[in-house]
Image: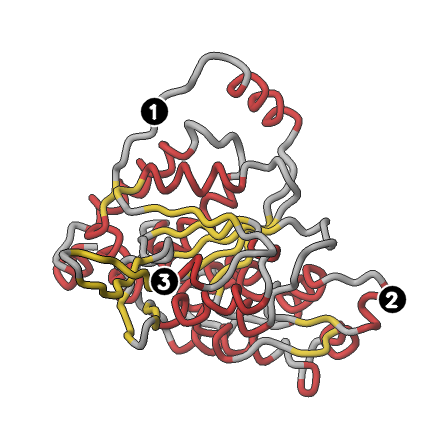
Amino acid sequence: MDELSARSGHDVSALLEAVGRVRAQVRKRIVGQDAVVDEVLMALAAGGHARLVGVPGLAKTLLVRTLAQALLLDFRRVQFTPDLVPSDITGAEVMEEAEGRRAFRFMRGPIFANIVLADEINRAPPRTQAALLEAMQEHSVTAAGETMALPEPFFVLATQNPIEQEGTYPLPEAQLDRFLFDIRVGYPTEAEELAVLRSTTGAAGEAIAPVLDAGQALALQRMVREVAATDEALRYANALVRATRPEASPVDPVRRYVRWGAGPRAGQALVLGAKAHALLDGRWTIAPGDIRRVAAPVLRHRIVPNFAADADGVGVEQVIAALLAEVSAPVSGIGG
């Protein structure tokens, strides 16, 4: 940790304590969903974007809003609807008149924020969804003939309801691939649901205090890049990604049930996600267990099942489980 602190110019222990305080602030409002909160924080630390998929009423939007309140960052929410147009996100030129002279001025849209919540992203048409592509990948927006940088850190959190199909537009694969993680939000346990009823039907809870600013968030992202990845870990991540491709996969369920496998960006996401997981766990070298921990959120939106999978009722989660069971991690001196 001292070596990482020296290289980054920030106190690693202090930053990790700040992340712990962010978790504590989020838990003032969010009951349970610990894995979801951890994956959102890992995505933030890795400098990536995340999509939260779950049925209505599971506090996806509340989670994002609470996280934004716990971070001293500019936050904007965009409610995606079928009539939303790209300029509603990126901004538009408006004509202003002053002292008898008219001139165009570009008014920036909600994309110019540190944290952008794209609520129900699949309700907007493809051209509006595509307006996010450049922003998510390049951290810039081109409008009115000018390319403008977005504020750093820049983090898109999208929510999606998986059960409603009418009036929705499936995200294209190119857009899905821009999300570092695809996070599934499930139902709470009985005890957690009872705690939700207690906390949301009584007196107002504690206010959320911001505990991490933009400079600290950027320092955390730089530290993630400094976490060491051995050749064995890189080979394991590469082997997992290559095994998702049916034409040469050693995994039988992949050959039988996958139409298209993951591309090279999945390997990058596995390594960065594993580095974020290791750092937030207080370690500065990734282990195979870190890669396995992030395999599902990294791969579930990058593997395209075929018709046989639909016919046999085999889901992507089962394919990923088979991958992790059959693709062995290289032997090294680092525990997994």
- Which labelled disc corresponds to residue 92? 3
Label 1 is placed on what type of residue? Ala
Q: Which residue is depicted at the point 51% across and 69% down?
A: 130
What residue does disc 2 label?
311
Label 2 is placed on what type of residue? Ala
Q: Position of residue 89 (x, y in %)?
A: 42, 58
User: Is residue 47 shown left or right of residue 290?
Assistant: left
Q: Position of residue 248 (x, y in %)?
A: 67, 87
Q: What residue occupies the far top of the structure in this picture?
A: 203
Give the image's coloring scheme.
secondary structure
Using a 10 Å C-alpha cutoff, classify the residue at mark 1 as few (fewer than 14 neighbours), some (14 to 19) or many (20 or more). few
**Is label 3 or label 1 in front?**
3
Residue 228 vs 50, above or below: the answer is below
- What secondary structure is found at the residue carrying circle 3? strand
What residue does disc 1 label?
207
- What secondary structure is found at the residue carrying circle 1? loop
Q: Position of residue 233 (x, y in %)?
A: 43, 72
Using a 10 Å C-alpha cutoff, classify the residue at mark 2 as few (fewer than 14 neighbours), some (14 to 19) or many (20 or more). few
- What secondary structure is found at the residue carrying circle 2? helix
Distance between mark 2 and mark 3 Cα atoms: 47 Å
Distance between mark 3 and mark 1 Cα atoms: 35 Å
Label 3 is placed on what type of residue? Ala
**Is label 2 or label 3 in front?**
3
Residue 293 vs 263, above or below: the answer is above
